[in-house]
Image (cartoon, rainbow, N blue to C red):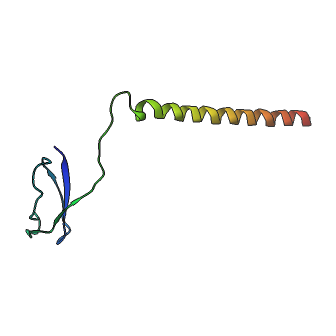
Amino acid sequence: MPIYEYECRFCSHKFELLQKISDPPPTVCPNCGKEGGIHKLISEASFELKGSGWYVTDYKNEKQTQKKETKQAQNSVKKDANKSKEDSKK
């Protein structure tokens, strides 16, 4: 069952309810007791993708590794170029 987040327009009290999709929304604020001021909030979903086969576990790390390797290779080429310039000056 999903957890819905609500807020009272009168007292600004925020609360969560675990309810079925088919359940009616609450009408009375549990904090101030006034009726008719409750509205549903749109909040960020929180879930975690576990196991293999997801972007986070399989593909994301490969791209980051490739970027690091590319940067390291570029840095070593620059160092080699600087060394050869110094050697040619001597």
The quadrant where residue 37 appears: bottom left
The quadrant where residue 72 appears: top right
> Residue, x 77% and y 32% (percent of image)?
80
Percent across and percent down for residue 19 are 12, 49
Q: Residue furthest front?
A: 22
Q: Is residue 83 left or right of residue 12?
A: right
Q: Is residue 81 left or right of residue 70?
A: right
In the rendered image of this protein, does residue 77 appear above or below residue 44?
above
In the rendered image of this protein, does residue 21 appear above or below residue 35?
above
> Residue, x 69% and y 36% (percent of image)?
75
Is 50 or 89 nearer to us in this picture?
Answer: 50
Q: Is residue 73 left or right of residue 47?
A: right
> Residue, x 47% and y 35% (percent of image)?
60
Is 43 or 71 nearer to us in this picture?
Answer: 43
The N terminus: image quadrant: top left
Percent across and percent down for residue 25 are 12, 57
Q: Residue furthest right?
A: 90
In the rendered image of this protein, does residue 33 appear above or below residue 19?
below
The quadrant where residue 11 appears: bottom left
> Residue, x 58% and y 35% (percent of image)?
67
Percent across and percent down for residue 76 are 71, 33
The C terminus: image quadrant: top right
Percent across and percent down for residue 52 are 37, 27
Q: Residue furthest bottom?
A: 10
Q: Is residue 90 left or right of residue 22?
A: right
